Amino acid sequence: MSGSCFAEMLSQLIDLSTVEQKALEKLEERHRSVRRGAVLQRENEGSNELYILRKGLMMSYVLLDDGSRQILRFLFPGDMLGVSSAVYREAPETLAALSDCVVCPFDRAALSDLMLEHPRLGAMVLVYSQIERVALTDRLAALGRTSAKARVAALLLDLRNRLRGTDKDLTNVFTLGLTQEEVGDATGLTAVHVNRMLRQLEEEHLIAREGGRVTLLDERALARAANYVNRYEGLDLSWLPKGP
């Protein structure tokens, strides 16, 4: 593997200079394999490392007082992991692999150096942190105010849109890659309820499922049912510092 997954993600939003690309490649010089089900970072434990997800699918979650799990985010190749841990002595969330993964670990000091030497790249770390914050705010509002069907529909749309970031040829057919329990832990539903909502979306001809793959049959109607907003669109980055 060569190049930078994080640079590839950023280049969808801004034109990176050769200098900026090389700076990002340095963050991904080391590779570490993480087996499916393994924990990369554990909640309430100290960590001095951040990561770029190079390959695979991961999740961040917290454990609640009753022992249940709330999945906060699903993480895709190109995502920077553990940024929130850089500002706390103890990690506020657990990072775990949903498939066999490859991550690129780097020290907090490397992020500090990047921000000092390349202010525009530092600003883009802020941009992506804010995109994630707004997307998480949407999900928080959905958990408290929308129906079970809307939550599942929004999650399907979000997963497809995130997968498009790593596969530009992806249309409306994608591999879900999650169990119904994992979908439930992300939407605040039981696995049984998730199954019921997926069947309802099928019966309404909004989606189709076959062999672990999901087809979005009527994306507009699905988005209306979910009250979904794609937070990776509609950005205004005109304020960014000039590149080198």
Image: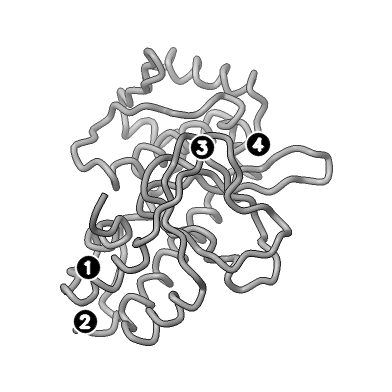
Tell me which residue sits at (47%, 37%) in the image.
Answer: 155
Is the residue under label 1 in contact with that under label 2 (CB below 8 Å)?
yes
Q: CA distance from mark 1 to mark 3?
A: 33 Å
Vertical placement of residue 76 versus 183, above or below = below
Mark 4 vs mark 3, foreground winner is 3
Residue located beneath label 3 in the image: 35
Mark 2 vs mark 4, foreground winner is 2
Is the residue under label 3 in contact with that under label 1 (CB below 8 Å)?
no
Amino acid type at mark 1: Ile
Q: Is residue 5 left or right of residue 91?
A: left
Tell me which residue sits at (50%, 15%) in the image.
Answer: 199
Mark 3 vs mark 2, foreground winner is 3
Vertical placement of residue 11 versus 66, above or below = below
Q: Position of residue 124 (x, y in %)?
A: 35, 71
Q: 203 or 13: which is nearer to us?
A: 13
Mark 1 vs mark 3, foreground winner is 3
Vertical placement of residue 185 versus 26, above or below = above
Tell me which residue sits at (31%, 64%) in the image.
Answer: 235
Amino acid type at mark 3: Arg
Q: CA distance from mark 4 to mark 1?
A: 35 Å
Q: Position of residue 22 (x, y in %)?
A: 23, 71
Q: CA distance from mark 2 to mark 4?
A: 42 Å
Residue located beneath label 1 in the image: 14
Mark 1: which secondary structure?
A: loop
Q: Earlier in the sequence, mark 4 or mark 1?
A: 1
Q: Position of residue 159 (x, y in %)?
A: 41, 39
Give the quadrant of residue 214: top left
Residue located beneath label 2 in the image: 243
Q: CA distance from mark 3 to mark 2?
A: 38 Å
Mark 2: which secondary structure?
A: loop
Q: 167 or 225: which is nearer to us?
A: 167
Residue located beneath label 4 in the image: 188
